[in-house]
Image (tube, grey):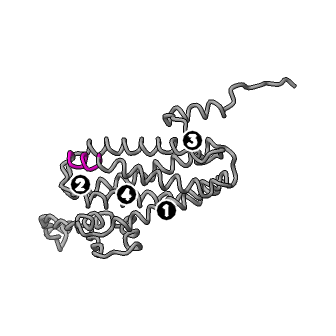
Amino acid sequence: MNPDEPTNPKPPEIHKPVLPQPAIPVQPPPLEPPVPENADIRTLIEALLRRPHALAQHLANPKNGATPKFALISLISLLLFGIVLGCFAKHEQLWAAPLKIAAGLLISGAICFPSLYIFATLAGSRIQAQQLAACLTGALALAGLLLLGFSPAIWIFAESTNSFGFMGALGIGAWIIAVFFAFKFLKQVIFSNGGTQRAPLTIWCAVFLLVTLQMTTSLRPILGRSPTVLTQEKKFFLEHWSEYFAENLPTTVTFTEE
């Protein structure tokens, strides 16, 4: 017996085959609770902000009854936002600005509704006119709620600055952001009713945005004061903006030597 050899040799290692681990099933996202049939204004506001997909299914019902409630939400929101803009010039603008903004945007929605029905049909949607009216008023209500959310910040600048250009850009910027989310909601509802083409809806969104911007020029003044409540001069909104900034921006700079 060789003394160098170990007395208790180790048994050979046995490698167990590595079995594939079972895949962890992916849990689907929880379904949004449906919107009640006779939803009140508070429920509709909560659905607009938190449950757009469930609200889209609710509006698919022709008897949803949401159109007048959405119209009331948008009217109150736009009036309050207009009061905030009216605080910039005060005086008669405290009542004129909210009336102009609310009336202008609601009239723009009514003007563009027939073309929305045509473009929604071209997009492949099977939505009915009554349902589409509820969708459009819902989009305007969402835009109004977003503008209402911007109102405290805009009010701070309305009370602390005299710059017409900055306040105008601030108001138009808030409207563009609000209308972007309104368009997103409108597309969700139309696509949930069979729509497949995005191009027709994108064209309509651009037309609606141009109409609202032109309406702000047609109903001017909204920020500043004027001897008349409404102007009779016809102008394209880009022309009006360019002329205004050309008149109010400094054209010459004077340097002094010390």
What residue sits 27% from the left and 57% below the top?
132
Closer to the chain start, of discs 1 and 4, is 1
Task: Residue 138: say if magenta.
Answer: no
Closer to the chain start, of discs 3 and 2, is 2
What residue sits 37% from the left and 75% below the top?
40
Give the residue number, with chain letter if any, for mark 4.
139
Give the residue number, with chain letter if any, for mark 3.
231
Give the residue number, with chain letter if any, for mark 2.
191
Give the residue number, with chain letter if any, for mark 1.
77
Disc 2 element: helix
Mark in front: 4 vs 2: 4
| Neighbours of disc 3 within 10 Å: few (<14), some (14-19), many (20+) | few
Q: Amino acid at mark 4?
A: Ala
Q: CA distance from mark 3 to mark 1?
A: 25 Å
Mark in front: 3 vs 1: 3
Check if mark 4's residue and mark 2's residue have beta carbons within 8 Å.
no
- Name the disc covering residue 31, or none: none
Disc 3 element: loop
Q: Amino acid at mark 3?
A: Thr
The N terminus, quarter of image:
bottom left
Q: Look at the image and give the residue range highlighted in magenta.
A: 115-122
The C terminus, quarter of image:
top right
Residue 139 image point, x, y percent: 37, 57
What residue sits 60% from the left and 48% below the top?
229
Check if mark 1's residue and mark 2's residue have beta carbons within 8 Å.
no
